[in-house]
Image (spheres, grey):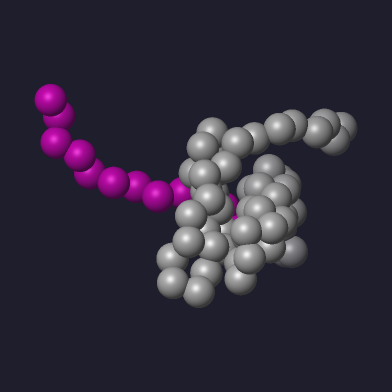
Amino acid sequence: MRKKRKFTASVWREGKWFVAQCLEVDVASQGRSESAALKNLADALALHFTPPVPTRAPKVRPVEVTVRAA
């Protein structure tokens, strides 16, 4: 189920680029204009919240480790 959510962003200029950083989630992006940076941030946030889909089945293997008893 998809749901729209609103986030807030801090936008500032670094040289020729605008940087947009989401304040609620550790995601940032950039663009040549403020609107481009915000659009790229929206794309990055959508990708951030998209669950990963494996392209092939993962190989799950046991791992044995010796640890010192406390």
Q: Is residue 68 magenta?
A: yes
Q: Which residues are magenta?
A: 58-70
Nearer-the-camera pick, 53 or 1:
1
Query: With 5 as the anchor, is 22 left or right in this view?
Result: left
Q: Where is the C terminus found, in terms of image quarters? A: top left
Instruction: Identify the residue at the far right of this view.
Output: 1
The tally of labels here is 0
User: Percent x, y for residue 21?
Assistant: 52, 48
Reply above or below: 15 against 42: below
Quarter where residue 66 is shown: top left
Residue at 60% x, 36% y is: 8
- Principal SS element in the magenta part? loop
Kindly tell me whether residue 29 is visible in this rendering.
Answer: yes
Reply above or below: 32 against 8: below
Residue at 70% x, 50% y is: 42
User: Percent x, y for residue 65?
Assistant: 29, 46
Nearer-the-camera pick, 54 or 70:
54
Reply above or below: 69 against 19: above
Q: Is residue 48 magenta?
A: no
Instruction: Identify the residue at the far top of this view.
Output: 70
Kindly tell me whether residue 44 is visible in this rendering.
Answer: no
Residue at 87% x, 32% y is: 1
User: Percent x, y for residue 11?
Assistant: 53, 50
Residue at 52% x, 59% y is: 19
User: Percent x, y for residue 48?
Assistant: 64, 48
Nearer-the-camera pick, 36 or 58:
36
Quarter where residue 57 is shown: bottom right
